[in-house]
Amino acid sequence: MPKHEQEYKMIGLNISYYRKLKGISQLQLAELIGLSRTHISNIKAPNMPTAVSLDTLLDIAEALNVPAKKLLDFHE
């Protein structure tokens, strides 16, 4: 099991939650931050924990119009 696997899964779930709340697709989010839809999908896939850079995390938070800390909040 990769180090921090559970945390990556929770970040992915949080991104998915806020993306759906905003009503945008994975493709739209990917286009907003300049990444491929596949990369966004991999970040959010619970069965494929993918590391995410701080820059990418901040870009996602900005695109979703949520504070970055919301994406790192595992207790809500």
Image (cartoon, rainbow, N blue to C red):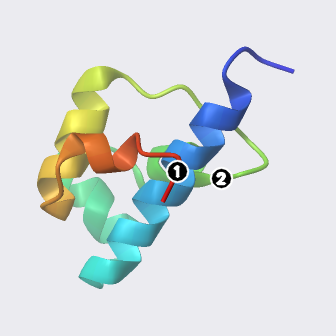
Looking at the picture, does residue 24 appear above or below residue 6? below
Q: Position of residue 53 (x, y in %)?
A: 36, 22
- Left or right: 24 as drawn, with respect to 10: left
Most distant residue in the right direction? 1
Identify the disc placed on residue 75: 1
Identify the disc placed on residue 12: none
Residue 29: quadrant of the picture? bottom left
Q: Position of residue 36 (x, y in %)?
A: 39, 48
Say which residue appears at 30% left-offset and 36% top-offset.
57
Query: Which kind of residue does numbered mark 2 sit on?
Result: Ala
Most distant residue in the top direction? 3
Check contact, mark 1 vs mark 2: CB within 8 A.
Answer: no
Q: Which of pointers 1 and 2 lies earlier in the amino acid sequence? A: 2
- Left or right: 27 as drawn, with respect to 31: right
Check disc 1: other Cα within 10 Å, few if <14, some if 14-19, many if 20+. Answer: few
Q: Is residue 33 visible?
A: yes
In the picture of the structure, the residue carrying the numbered disc 2 is 45
Say which residue appears at 66% left-offset and 21% top-offset.
4
Front residue of this view, candidates 43 and 70: 70
Q: Position of residue 10 (x, y in %)?
A: 58, 47
Q: Secondary structure at mark 1?
A: loop
Q: Position of residue 72 (x, y in %)?
A: 40, 40
Query: Which kind of residue does numbered mark 1 sit on?
Result: His
Looking at the picture, does residue 47 appear above or below residue 56? below
Q: Secondary structure at mark 2?
A: loop
Say which residue appears at 44% left-offset and 28% top-offset.
52
